[in-house]
Each structure stands twice: as C-alpha cells, then as structure tokens.
Image (cartoon, rainbow, N blue to C red):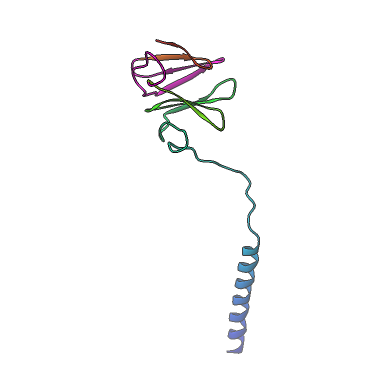
Amino acid sequence: MKKLLIKAFLFSWIGITAFSSHAQHKPSPEFVYRVWNNQNGLPQNTVYEIIQDSIGYLWGGTEEGLFRFDGSRFHVISNENTPGLQSNNFYNVRGHGSRVWASTRNSVLRIRNEVEKTI
C-alpha cells in the first residue's frame, strides 16, 4: 500500500513539474502573418488567380475587380475606374516581363503601372 502511494505521488509530482515547466516557456513566434480580406482593401475574399510581377507587386483576380498589392495597400481595377471594362470578374491573370495581362469574360487588359489598353 505504501509503495502504491509513493508511486502515485511520484507520477503526480512528475506530471505537475512537467506541466509547470512547459507553461513557463512560452514559444517565441518564428514568423509573422497578416490576413487581408474585403474589410481592409481586398475587393473580395475569394481570389481566383494570383501572380507576382517582375517588380514585386502581387496581382490577383476576383469577381469584384483586379487588384495590385504592394505589401501594404491594394489598388483595385474595376469597371468603376477603367473605361471600356464591362465586367469586374477577373479569373485569368498572367505576367509577361514588366506587363500584366488580365481577362474577364469579354475584356482583356494590358497593364504596366496603370491600364494601358482594354481590348
């Protein structure tokens, strides 16, 4: 009986010691992440295609417009700010050198820093 009590005490003590020593050592963050969504600049939460151009911008296609992201701000290209663009549904985005090509159902955009041409 005495041996059983000693074993129970030792297991409890080992468990408490292990738990308390683990609780004292908080893991340090090895990376930082941020979440972007439609509440902080992304035109829509669903991104159908994303690329990085030769300058380093991220470009993505959504159903609410095409976006360019520089790491802190979004610039959205949509039919509200681009003459001749009939739809905001961008499903295809491709990079070619310093240019980006993006298409909707009925339009193709050629972009460098701004929309150069709508076809």
Q: Position of residue 119 (x, y in %)?
A: 39, 10
Q: Would residue 84 be counted in the magenta stretch? A: yes
Measuring from the top left, give residue 46's x and y in whole percent: 40, 34
Please, is residue 33 above or below residue 51 in the view?
below
Task: Say which quadrant the N terminus sits in.
Answer: bottom right
Residue 93 vs 33, above or below: the answer is above
How many dots with numbers? 0
- Where is residue 90? Give x, y as percent: 39, 23
Q: Which residues are magenta?
A: 80-106
Q: Image point 59% across, 24% down: which residue?
A: 56
Q: Residue furthest front?
A: 81
Q: Of 11 and 76, which appears nearest the observer?
A: 76
**Residue 114 placement (x, y as % from top left):** 50, 16
Q: Is residue 56 above or below residue 116?
A: below
Which quadrant of the structure image shows residue 6?
A: bottom right
Q: Quadrant of residue 42?
A: top left
